[in-house]
């Protein structure tokens, strides 16, 4: 089964509205005509609506970096799936390691968010990944199994088939240390195997699984050539158009 690669830029807490709009205009020109790769940018909440409007009709998608799991209510500071959809989003990053590390994100809530996002018609990009001490003590697969099984608990097969999973080893995020092509393929192949065990081979053949962690134009082609890697979730290198579009081109 041929899966369309998806390159998503996670801008984290960078870019004002005017900076985001300038980026959007430049990106439109840089990736114009590339049809074989899906391109998504994930600005901060404050720029979502305007970036969505600026990219309307281009095929470049917009995603949020987090979400709450109910549509409205007395939840100060939170943003709902319904609001993200209304702002023009089609994707939501869920369970990013920075949310897990700094903001107390736990697997049960990742699962609640994934379910709510799917029910609202948006596509989750669910992040999983091991920390360096977990890799060094040989429990990478155990950690990935726990996060993946918990995040996908209770979902229907067709929901899983349509979502995106991002394997992001925590030690590779923002550190300049990329997983080797073989290591990234090994863990992503393991995740695909887990999905097959849980939801069947057909779902495993459809679900897209990205690699994330210090992806740059220089290392993207090798990662993207791996049989189970369907694109990248990109942090630092997604903040300027030459680097980000270079990664998109490497996946094409
Ligand atoms: C990320 O934040 O999801 C990420 C992969 O960051 P970086 O590309 O900077 O390692």
Image (tube, rainbow, N blue to C red):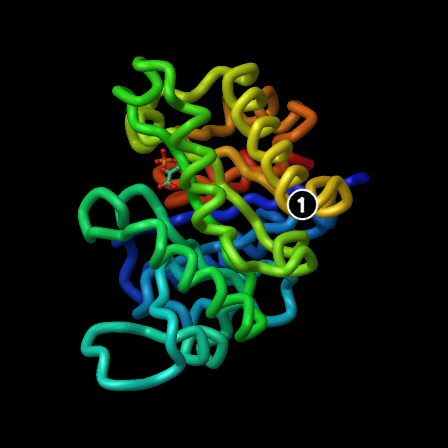
Q: Residue furthest bottom?
A: 73
Q: Residue at x 44, y 67 (%)?
A: 51
Above or below: residue 61 compared with residue 146: below
Q: Residue 48, located in which quarter of the rendered image?
A: bottom left
Above or below: residue 162 compared with residue 196: below
Q: Residue 134, located in which quarter of the rendered image?
A: top left
Q: Residue 112, located in which quarter of the rendered image?
A: bottom left
Which corner quadrant holds the C terminus? top right
Is residue 17 found left or right of 186 in the rendered image?
left
Is residue 122 found left or right of 72 in the rendered image?
right
Between 114 and 239, the one nearer to me in the picture? 114
- Mark 1 — residue? 37
Mark 1, ligand 1, within 8 Å: the answer is no
Where residue 240 appears, x then y in whole percent? 40, 43
Q: Residue at x 53, y 38 (%)?
A: 232
Q: Residue at x 41, y 79 (%)?
A: 83
Residue 212 in view in this figure: no
Is residue 221 found left or right of 13 in the rendered image?
right
């Amino acid at each position: 089964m041929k899966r369309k690669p998806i390159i998503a830029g996670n801008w984290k807490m960078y870019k004002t509205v005017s900076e985001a709009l300038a980026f959007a205009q430049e990106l439109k020109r840089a990736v114009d005509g590339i049809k074989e790769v899906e391109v998504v940018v994930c600005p901060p909440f404050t720029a979502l609506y305007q970036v969505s409007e600026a990219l309307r009709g281009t095929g470049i998608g917009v995603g949020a970096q987090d979400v709450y799991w109910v549509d409205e209510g007395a939840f100060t500071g939170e943003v709902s799936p319904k609001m993200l959809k209304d702002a023009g989003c089609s994707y939501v990053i869920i369970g990013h390691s920075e949310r897990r590390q700094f903001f107390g994100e736990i697997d049960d809530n990742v699962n609640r968010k994934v379910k709510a996002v799917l029910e609202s018609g948006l596509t989750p990009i669910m992040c999983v990944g091991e920390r360096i001490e977990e890799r060094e003590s040989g429990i990478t697969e155990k950690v990935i199994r726990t996060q993946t099984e918990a995040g996908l608990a209770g979902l229907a097969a067709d929901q899983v088939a349509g979502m995106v999973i991002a394997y992001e080893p925590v030690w590779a995020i923002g550190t300049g240390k990329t997983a080797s092509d073989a290591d990234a393929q090994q863990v992503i192949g393991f995740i695909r195997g887990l999905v097959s065990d849980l939801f069947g081979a057909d779902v495993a053949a459809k679900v897209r699984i990205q690699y994330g962690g210090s992806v740059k134009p220089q290392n993207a082609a090798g990662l993207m050539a791996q049989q189970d890697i369907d694109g990248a979730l990109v942090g630092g290198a997604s903040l300027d158009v030459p680097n980000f579009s270079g990664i998109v081109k490497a996946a094409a």
